[in-house]
Image (spheres, helix red, strand yellow):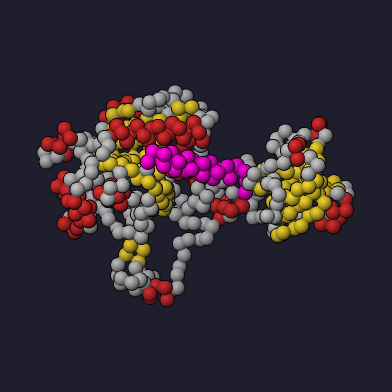
Amino acid sequence: MLRTHTCGELRKEHAGQKTTLSGWVQTHRIQGKLSFILLRDRYGTTQIFVNPKITQEIGEIRRESVIQVTGEVVLRPENQIKKELSTGEIELSAEKITILTHADPLPLELDENTESGDETRLKYRYLDLRMPKMAKNIIKRHEAVMFVREYLDKQGFLEINTPILTKSTPEGARDYLVPSRIHKGKFYALPQAPQQYKQLLMVAGFDKYFQIAPCFRDEAARANRCPGEFYQIDMEMSFVTQDDVLKIVEDMMIKLIETVFPDKKITQIPFPRLKYEDVMKEYGTDSPDIRKNKEDKNEMGFCWVIDFPLFTKQTEEDYFHGAGKNLAPSHHMFTAPKKEDEHLLDTEPQNVKSYQHDLVLNGFEVGGGSIRIHNSEMQAKIFDLIGFTEEQKKEFKHILEAFKYGVPPHGGIAPGLDRLLMVIMGKDTIRDVIAFPKDSSAKDPVVNAPSTVTKEQLNELHIETKK
Ligand code: ASP
């Protein structure tokens, strides 16, 4: 190792020890003949005292250069303890400094008070993320993911990866397509969600599934939605009622807040379960904000919205790609109608309610799911009602076929990881919780994707681009 400790680790107990630190030069302040370096890594910063001899040898080190320092830990005098630093009781008195890599002047100011989001910050995201404020979001995300994995593992869930190269099916959003080289003229699609695979996993007998699943949707950016891709805590369970799904997700959310975000307080436990019709009347939206004090960044107003209509009218804003001109599924076409409303399907489909459930936090929908249809006749009927053509129905024949071979009743949900974290952490933009976010035009500014490709690549894929 090129270090014995991290830059956030040394305390007064280490005084007198010889240690080696490696990190980034946050500042190098020369004071007459001697100098001070603030050395930073992801764990914190440590002050380095540089004696006149070494100061003269190394000259002024440019900010953000990477150095290795060996020296002795010395106590700072009582009146010079730096309270704002966890390492503020000590400094490292350098005996040897090696410059591992020099840094050019940076294209952006690493200033904690500047909001991320502008183009330069996104382009140089790896620099932006050096700021402790930004790094903290990514570290919190890791903690949340670890918590979810451990929680669900303890509950008997299996994390199962589903394909990324899959099939384009009419599922709501526009698909991202991937041309096949081997199968001329054919395309894979990136999954909008692992919905069909997770249902097939239920048919396979894996009664509790989850996955931190990447989802791809070719949609316009919105404040709380990153265009292109996002992650879901995707879950599915067999032999459950809606109440079972709600209970386990609710318990997971409560414990996630307690464990990873202990400063936060939940408005109401158990989470209120509100009927769609009632929240539309009372709040005028299906994502009600039930917080008592909306100014309080630490208040977490979770609620459930249930009893959604099974169908909605197609709207331009939220066009369900794939469905016909009139009715679109309110959630998706695998959501089951309420048992007591099934008889209305042929005569008054618009009045049929469903087993959809949305998890709402502080006025944001942070997850949706449902109890699914588990019989192929009912599934075929719903396809008809939303106006699928015969061609479109064929695209789903694997599901209809699978349902012929013994399918357990099942249901699930998929909280959106990025959005959930954005709301819990009170961020204004979802980009703050994503290491390398797309910009608002769905570009990846770091590597500059999408990009043109060579003629040879296109030829191999049997593709010609229009001028
Ligand atoms: N796959 C669904 C979605 O992405 C979630 C679910 O029904 O579990 O909205």
Q: Is residue 71 left or right of residue 193?
A: right
**Above or below, 340 relative to 175:** above
**Above or below, 121 relative to 150:** below
Quarter of the rendering containing residue 359: top left
Q: Position of residue 457 (x, y in %)?
A: 42, 73
Q: Magenta region's main secondary structure?
A: helix
Quarter of the rendering containing residue 397: bottom left
Quarter of the rendering containing residue 373: top left
Q: Which residue sits at x=37%, y=27%?
A: 271
Q: Which residues are magenta?
A: 130-156
Q: Position of residue 91 (x, y in %)?
A: 78, 42
Residue 63 visible in the current orientation: no
Q: Which residue sits at x=77%, y=34%?
A: 81
Q: Which residue sits at x=47%, y=56%?
A: 443
Q: Nearer the viewer, residue 235 or 414?
A: 235
Indicate yes or no whether the magenta region holds residue 143. yes
Q: Position of residue 256 (x, y in %)?
A: 46, 35
